[in-house]
Amino acid sequence: MRILAVTCHPDDLEIGAGGTIAKYADRGDEVVLCHVANGNLGHVVIPPEELGAIRTKEAETAGKVLGAREVISLDVGDLFVSSHDEKLAAEICEVVRSVRPDVILTHDPNDYMRDHVETGKAVFNGSFSASVVYYITDSPAFPGNACPIYYMDNLGGVNFLPTEYVDISDTIERKLDALRCHESQIKWMLEHDGIDFVDFVRTCAKFRGFQCGAAYAEGFRGCMVWPRIPTKRMLP
Amino acid sequence: MRILAVTCHPDDLEIGAGGTIAKYADRGDEVVLCHVANGNLGHVVIPPEELGAIRTKEAETAGKVLGAREVISLDVGDLFVSSHDEKLAAEICEVVRSVRPDVILTHDPNDYMRDHVETGKAVFNGSFSASVVYYITDSPAFPGNACPIYYMDNLGGVNFLPTEYVDISDTIERKLDALRCHESQIKWMLEHDGIDFVDFVRTCAKFRGFQCGAAYAEGFRGCMVWPRIPTKRMLP
Amino acid sequence: MRILAVTCHPDDLEIGAGGTIAKYADRGDEVVLCHVANGNLGHVVIPPEELGAIRTKEAETAGKVLGAREVISLDVGDLFVSSHDEKLAAEICEVVRSVRPDVILTHDPNDYMRDHVETGKAVFNGSFSASVVYYITDSPAFPGNACPIYYMDNLGGVNFLPTEYVDISDTIERKLDALRCHESQIKWMLEHDGIDFVDFVRTCAKFRGFQCGAAYAEGFRGCMVWPRIPTKRMLP
Amino acid sequence: MRILAVTCHPDDLEIGAGGTIAKYADRGDEVVLCHVANGNLGHVVIPPEELGAIRTKEAETAGKVLGAREVISLDVGDLFVSSHDEKLAAEICEVVRSVRPDVILTHDPNDYMRDHVETGKAVFNGSFSASVVYYITDSPAFPGNACPIYYMDNLGGVNFLPTEYVDISDTIERKLDALRCHESQIKWMLEHDGIDFVDFVRTCAKFRGFQCGAAYAEGFRGCMVWPRIPTKRMLP
Amino acid sequence: MRILAVTCHPDDLEIGAGGTIAKYADRGDEVVLCHVANGNLGHVVIPPEELGAIRTKEAETAGKVLGAREVISLDVGDLFVSSHDEKLAAEICEVVRSVRPDVILTHDPNDYMRDHVETGKAVFNGSFSASVVYYITDSPAFPGNACPIYYMDNLGGVNFLPTEYVDISDTIERKLDALRCHESQIKWMLEHDGIDFVDFVRTCAKFRGFQCGAAYAEGFRGCMVWPRIPTKRMLP
Amino acid sequence: MRILAVTCHPDDLEIGAGGTIAKYADRGDEVVLCHVANGNLGHVVIPPEELGAIRTKEAETAGKVLGAREVISLDVGDLFVSSHDEKLAAEICEVVRSVRPDVILTHDPNDYMRDHVETGKAVFNGSFSASVVYYITDSPAFPGNACPIYYMDNLGGVNFLPTEYVDISDTIERKLDALRCHESQIKWMLEHDGIDFVDFVRTCAKFRGFQCGAAYAEGFRGCMVWPRIPTKRMLP
């Protein structure tokens, strides 16, 4: 299978679906990661231009740890992601056309902040266009129907009832290693604020694991609209 | 009564509410249909400019089959419908003011693709403005409250629990005849892809019919916000 | 039409649907009211046996004010209503068979106390049996399908989102007059506790009225299960 | 895998999950069907004692068509199924212990009539006890956790949003053949009432198929409680 | 505590949360009110430019009645509030930074018209940015997490199930006095349309009061997203 | 305040609300714990009669650790808790009357197994009766309205969205110590099955803590029915 994860800031993918991505990769699926925002406002000291570049690099390193074939950045500035941005819609469509995924992972439109909410909607919108022949982007239209979308758990698992779970017991360490690649975030929070974000993410995975009888797990819910509903399991 | 249906692409009205519209017309209500998008991207061969014109014509023919007094097209390009488009908001307001409907039918904002979602929201927004005197469009403000809105079933009936049903046993054939007027869609799908879309739509109506004890039915849910809640049945 | 309201204690009908019942009666529908419990525990002074008789009489008087043809009491003791009581199920079935209603009104199974919850479930259960030929009660089986059920608003309107509203502006005073017939409750609360329950009920009706553009209204939600879903308005 | 379906009346299994059961059987899973009620009240002419025996036999024939290893009847009389019946709870527990299923299919507790509702709850209750050592039935306790439960679609698909779908395109005819084995129901309805129930069931399966891109499908939702949540697909 | 209420048109605050605001002020909390729209289209006779100025003044008077420290107007024209308006997002962020609230009150995104819906979303979006150092507005970033948001009741209480209630028995008259300050709305409706809007608002507060055992109350629901969830009561 | 927690098996209280109970006790509230079931079937080796006695004692020890004034056991056998058991209803009523609580904690009726579900319903039912004068138990009727109920988190946090959180950072160790008092469960699972249940419970509390910005937390949702809705925080 071909898997496309379109998440918002660098590190969001690792938080929400890192273990699942590693599991896909481990079983031989082809995985492409795409970050919509460059994370340029995610620091109290490092200025935006500098930070954007740093985080794009961190995301690439993390993607390798997870076994992704490619890590794409759409380079939207933090706090400016919009599902009404036609340029972004076209870019997401082009990513979908170039990857031709069997399944897409993205943010739940009920997540905790605008960029995530808008990413979820933009992916819903942009991925639909991939099969529309006269909607022109660099790559030709993707034949067939819009593919299934799975929404990742919200940050902190708040207000989210997963309908499907992935056992990530075998990939939890890789998920956390990938998360640690985001040094500008993880290391900084630990050293300057005393916040152990890796522990936060591990705990969430352990909690979701308890719910489904696994040591560690990630939860998802399918986007239930025509024609995105599958009759087989799309998650690993 | 005066009925206004504001749906997205030509053929969406027929799929979601064709039987209901015909029933309204049959009992003497005045019906106006309005298509927000021109459907110009709805084909794999026919180019957009040509297709837009073809489909606008198909919609007019279909509207006549259903007994509509008028078929309006707002001529937005496919994949570009937006509830944040102020021009569209004003155009929908103007349509509402010119029709002065007792009830509006439109897409559920949980439908399967952006244009439908945004149409549902744009109608919610635009129809409110109709009574605001100093919001200026060609026609004068429509006195009184915003009128009831009913959301049509989602495509394929996915993720939709109707709260009201219309028995369309007497108009199912007219609904399907109107649907067949959209030759660029229906005939093409049948001949080139082997997809019998008329059968799809008939089956959905039969299923909704089973649910309410009718041979064929269409399902709706009322938009429950002040002051759009009626104390009598607005559906035929 | 023939209307059957099966509510719990005497006065519950008046609180939840008195205006609707009066409206049915006013337009010529035949209305039968049935109280499951006798209300025998509804007082701090009057002992149960005495109170049961008093309240049964109050219910009859109130029923006349609303225009009901008949008021039936199933005489279950307060706090002992159970949807798992086979005798009660049979009695409700018999009531349904003797009345042959086109629509049934009862309590929402999410209401505020056990007797109401269980009444709602018992009516759901018992009314189904009415058409089952070999389920024997005094009257013969009622041919045809189980009829539509509408659940009344919860006490105080808590946790209830009506899907249909009845304009009771013309019958609000009759509703309140019928309520006042329950002297052992209404008059007592006013004189001994200083609680003006009639004002409580009037305010709820006024609030529901605001929601639907009427001076006074009552809210309901249909019980959405096969084959109880109608294609026309069952409420007046 | 070992599959246990505990449904209510004979023919309920075929209506809700016949195609899925046949698919399980086709791929080599071991399937046991269990009917809680004997269906003895399901006729307007044939008396209960006679009908119970007839329908039990019809259920066995239908079970063979679907490829079930065994068809068990718990022989509860129609309209008397109760989740508060301790004898029934013990019997369901015993069935679970004797079968040791990997997954259980049953009715959704929101279905259209009491027996179905109570069956869904009784299975939820009874299957939990299977692993409790000192809860004594004929078979020893079933080691390990309570297994996943999937609720079948409600009758007529009313008020049910499936979270998982099974493509039954290959087994739809077998599903309908099994349904036809219930002659006392299907043939009778057709000949005496002119109701083509097989067509009803086929249409529902076709509708659920449209929703998930299959010719025919059945919809289910998982019972989401600890420890019944799996991390792999339990449906075929 | 510091309280910030960001509502849409002048008078919306009084309708939804006037009693709560007065209660906050009475107990010594510092309250700032902010109106996003200037209400310039809220009249059938007075022209927009004139009305905007009148209503801004009315809002200031009303704010004083409620005990607010300050009343801010963002001066967006009616029917043009948009959560995708970056200027508005920045302005809301700046208001949050200048006030440094412990809690924010705003409109529920399910309210009855676009400006309210968009205000609710814009506040959700804009208030998040307050702590982002490199998102530049006049005031410096607000250290710490995004603060709790409480959504006010929808207009007319439609489609809103409060999760928390505030007893406003002591401040109901002040709430209504503040409401009366909006003479261009309240007095006009009474004199020209015979609509007693103060009575409408009083009735809603009385109804919410019945629900929670108070003479008058206002209902709210918390915005449940990370990190906006408190472990103590934020409402007075 | 007086707090009453009515939970099912010994140890359920500690799992769901141990930290909250300790917090209530720490601030001087009077706490009474009541176990409906005796837990007699909760072991694979120790026989029921023996186990019931052991666990009742463990519950008392645990209750002391949490600071409870008293620990009551209603001594119902495991798997036999029923909300339709009139004796149990009376016993719960009597407990409520003897304690006169300001708030009750119990199981959510959506929890994972019958005894918990039925306990939640039985408490809802039984606690209502406490103020009904002529419903006779040993203690006199409890004057005033039915008190607020808060439902504890489901086991494993499955299918539960808390509306209120309690910060238990100061009492988490006491919660876990109390849990460890249930040696027949906790120690056994650890030694024989290698399951560290204390770690399970700690992780759930840590997860709920992340959601609300605390080191550890417990989540609850209020039972929203008349007249159980408070206007102040009932949780510590």
Image (cartoon, coloured by chain):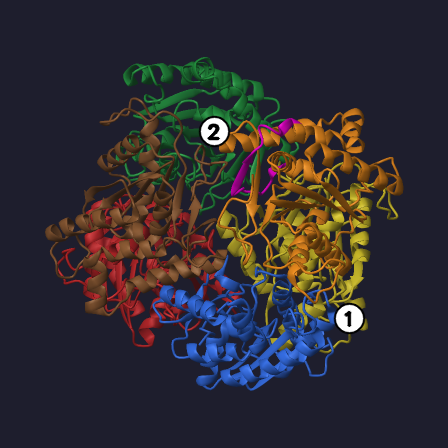
Chain colours: A brown, B green, C yellow, D orange, E red, F blue
> Closer to us: mark 2 or mark 1?
1
Q: Quadrant of residue A69?
A: top left
Element marked by disc 2:
strand
Whether residue C100 sits left or right of residue D216 in the image: it is right
Residue type at the position of mark 1: Leu
Residue F47, percent from left and from top: 69, 74
Q: Is residue F141 visible?
A: yes
Residue F74, percent from left and from top: 67, 77
Of B31 and F61, nearer the camera is F61
Contact, CB < 8 Å: mark 2 with mark 1? no
Residue type at the position of mark 2: Arg
Residue A4, compared with residue B194, is above or below; it is: below
10 Å crowding of disc 1: few (<14), some (14-19), many (20+): some
- Seen at 59% across and 55% down, the residue is C153
Residue D234, percent from left and from top: 55, 45
Whether residue D209 sits left or right of residue A221 in the image: it is right
Subunit ID for the residue under disc 1: C
10 Å crowding of disc 2: few (<14), some (14-19), many (20+): some
**Which region shows up in magenta?**
D156-173
Residue C152, compared with residue F45, is above or below; it is: above
- Residue bearing mark 1: C51
Q: Can residue E43 be found in the magenta stretch?
A: no
- Residue bearing mark 2: B2
Estimate the spatial distance between the alpha carbons at disc 2 and disc 1, rounded to whole Å.
Answer: 55 Å
Q: Is residue E214 visible?
A: no
Whether callout 2 and callout 1 share a subunit is answered: no
